[in-house]
Image (cartoon, rainbow, N blue to C red):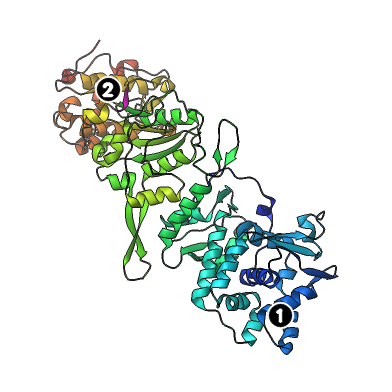
Amino acid sequence: MTFPSPYDSPVEKDGRWTTSDSFSYPKQKIGLCILLWLAKRPTSELAYTVKVSSNELKFSDDVIVSLQNLIGVDTQQKDRIADELNSHVFLKDQIESLKMGLEYVYRLAQIDFVDHNRPDNAERTGGLRYDKSIRYSANIDIIDSFVSANPGALDVLHSWGLPDSASRLGITADTEVEFGLVRILTTMSESAVFRLQDDDPRYFTQSGIYSALEESSTVTFKGNREMKGPVRVLNSILRAGMHAHLGGSADNVVPRGSGFSEYASRVGVLHELTRPVFIAETGRSAASPHIATPTPPPVTAPFARNRIISGAPGTGKSFRLANDARDLGAEVERVVFHPATSFASFFGSLRPAGEGDDNSSLAFRFVPGPFIRSFVRAMLHPSDLHVLLIEEINRADAAAAFGDVFQLLDRDANGVSEYAINVSADCASFLTRNGVPVEEGVRLPPNLLLWATMNPADQGVTQLDSAFLRRWERSFVSIDEGDAVLEDANLRLAEYDLEIPWNSFRRRLNEMLLGIERHIPEDRLIGPFFVPTSEWDQDTHDRLFVDKIIHYVSEEVLRHDRGSFFGASSLKTFSQIRDDYFSHGNRIADWLRSSFPFKLPGSSVAEDGIGDRMDAESSIHADPQ
């Protein structure tokens, strides 16, 4: 399930977000609203109702006559048009519904009670209706110009606003003119902010839908709670086919028509030009981005912005970085590098998105990778820290995966990239639609931290070149760092009735590995968190001991020396080692008892049974003591 991309600017709370009224029959309401203007222009404010009873309104006679004259019908049809007008949804709807559609979404007109002291929720209960007036905005002048330039536009509005009389009179809408009117109305609605009703509510604009559709074939703005407020209006608009570039409904929004991507890009520019800009010197807001450039508060962190932690497996590298990010209150995106990781998967790339606008060719869209996703979030929220955490950075060809991003790793004293890079036109379009300017290229912002883990001794890793590495702050986690938290952890080996302190076992095992003739580097040793802490709660650890610890030593560290290390030259494969352990062949048991002279109080194993010195067969091991 894909939701619209969230709106990134501050949002003022609005009571209209919580109303349950829908903007049903949007064509009839919008059509009649425009017809009222055309009938009474240039009057910008019009009191259009007369109260019949507490629950019923009708149009004033003056308004009815003006509409009849606009349409130009004979006397016989005038009465029927009057009846259609006085039973119109424009009169029956509560004022809150009209406000949501005409004011909040389309910015076309303002609807008020004639009695300005009456609250907007006065019509919610009892079916009460009160006299209303309408005040048109400058958007109506755009509609007026379109109608004046297109003779068929009046027929479109007639078929929308008064469909019964249009049908009787044989009036049909010219589809090309109708779509032109829909395009104008769609553009007028682009500034509306909607609220998705969910356990985790989010605000979004239609630009957020366009952006999400760049990554998914369908989008939903229907959460797990009842839709309320403007999202109900948007749902009605889509279901009525009143959107030029979106179709479907709340739970299945799809692109519509040709030119979707290009229109979405233009809307992104529109949002960028109309985004409020804070002027630090005065505290005023400005509409134009040319007046001032927002200056976010300085973002500081006690850690390097480009940071690599390396160490042996089980030293808690990932845990340490996640902990540091949590302490900073940073938002984290995690990605694991592997041999197939490429610049396209890390940065982002064009990917097929179904058929093109003419249904005859394959369409493509830019799909952001973890780098661009993190970059966009950091740019849109400059006061928050964002961490892109790259696990196992050296399991991929990092230089190839980073590509041009390599140039961004050089940062100035403020944490901003010293050099900018240019991105592809498709990526630039994606960034622009999401409110990130690219006119001067892309630079890492100071609040985007790139952190990574690596273990140089792992199999299948790629050597990182010095030019890449020197742009990172590197730290090494020592093999015993942080092991105090596991002081009470014990390996319980039920097969042989042994219970061995984990830290003592691990340290002794590492000493033995360092003591063999073939040099074993430190980052091949076993760290304290090699065994996940959750697994210490198990009743026995036999399988964990053999299939995880002994397997690692046998297959990843020793490989060709396993028999001599385990004190029996006949143990040439891991399968033989495993079979010996579980079949009580005693070669591994003898190795344990002789090599690990530890006694746990309360153990059923006699103190002398564990042994005080190494077995003669394992004399290959050096005792660092």
- Quick one: which residue is furthest to the top in this view? 625
Between 95 and 162, the one nearer to me in the picture: 162
Q: Amino acid at mark 2?
A: Leu
**Residue designated by label 1:** 68
**Residue designated by label 2:** 509
Placement of the C terminus among the 4 image quadrants: top left
Segment colored magenta? 471-476
Q: Amino acid at mark 1?
A: Gln
Residue occupying the point 79% across, 54% down:
119
In the figure, 109 relative to 164: above or below? above
Taking 545 as reference, is 188 left or right?
right
Taking 470 as reference, is 440 left or right?
right
Q: Earlier in the sequence, mark 1 or mark 2?
A: 1
Could you say where residue 248 lies in the image, as x and y percent from the top left?
Answer: 51, 67
Could you say where residue 467 lies in the image, as x and y percent from the top left?
Answer: 23, 29
In the figure, 326 relative to 251: above or below? above
Is residue 473 highlighted in magenta? yes
Could you say where residue 302 lies in the image, as x and y percent from the top left?
Answer: 44, 23
**Mark 2: secondary structure:** helix
Residue occupying the point 44% across, 28% down:
324
Q: Quadrant of residue 257?
A: bottom left
Q: Is residue 86 visible?
A: no
In the figure, 315 relative to 206: above or below? above
Give how far apart the Cα atoms at labels 1 and 2 are. 96 Å
- Mark closer to the observer (1, 2): 1
What is the crowding at mark 1: few (fewer than 14 residues within 10 Å), some, or many (at least 20)? Answer: some
What is the crowding at mark 2: few (fewer than 14 residues within 10 Å), some, or many (at least 20)? Answer: some
Is residue 319 highlighted in magenta? no
